[in-house]
Image (cartoon, rainbow, N blue to C red):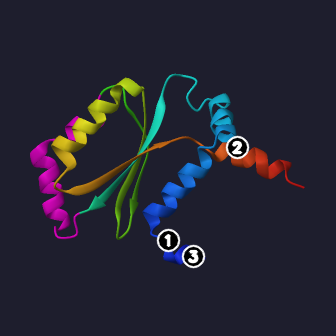
Amino acid sequence: MHSLRSIPPVSFVLALLLTLALPGHAQSAAAKGGGTDGTMLLTIFMKHDQGKTLEEINAHLDRTGFRKSFPPAGVEVVSWYVMMGVGQVVTVRLPPEKLREVNLAFEKGAWGAFRTEFYPTYDYRPIWEKTRSATP
């Protein structure tokens, strides 16, 4: 048996996402507006290239125009957090047909400054709150 400490963070996140993606949870999320408007959430891990200084990373983003090309039109930034020692985590809401534009913005602008990972996401908080309040 593994403890949580022995599970790499990305593996833990993937396991959590797979657990939350069970049909009952996904249907509940859709009923709460998590996709009924034709949009999806996408969480992006932007892991810093620790071989570069912050100034080098910023110079790369300026040189490639990433800050001007991301987010593409029609894509909403829902949250953008810095994870100290790791990088940045961005969640965006977008129509599925905009997925390619988001991908291209990262390929053309962020690659070289960050290693990226993309995860389809949905808002589980309303489900968690409902379940928590129903628990005796």
| Placement of the C terminus among the 4 image quadrants | bottom right
Residue at numbered disc 3: 2
Q: For the magenta stretch, what is the residue range?
A: 49-72
> Do the CB atoms of the residues marked 1 and 3 lie less than 8 Å apart?
yes
Residue at numbered disc 1: 7
Residue 132: x and y, percent?
78, 52
- Judged from the image, the secondary structure of the residue bearing numbered disc 3 is loop
| Placement of the N terminus among the 4 image quadrants | bottom right
- Judged from the image, the secondary structure of the residue bearing numbered disc 2 is helix
- Judged from the image, the secondary structure of the residue bearing numbered disc 1 is loop
The outermost residue toward the left is 63
User: Would residue 100 be counted in the magenta stretch?
Assistant: no
Q: Earlier in the sequence, mark 1 or mark 3?
A: 3
Please tell me which residue is depicted at 61% across the width and 29% down the height of the picture: 33
Q: Earlier in the sequence, mark 1 or mark 2?
A: 1
Q: Nearer the viewer, residue 86 or 116?
A: 116
Residue 116: x and y, percent?
30, 52
Q: Amino acid at mark 3?
A: His
Classify residue 107 as left or right of residue 76.
Answer: left
Please tell me which residue is depicted at 57% across the width and 76% down the height of the picture: 2
Nearer mark to the viewer, of 2 and 3: 3
Q: Amino acid at mark 1?
A: Ile
Residue 103: x and y, percent?
27, 38
State the CA–CA distance, disc 1 to disc 3.
7 Å
Circle number at residue 127: 2
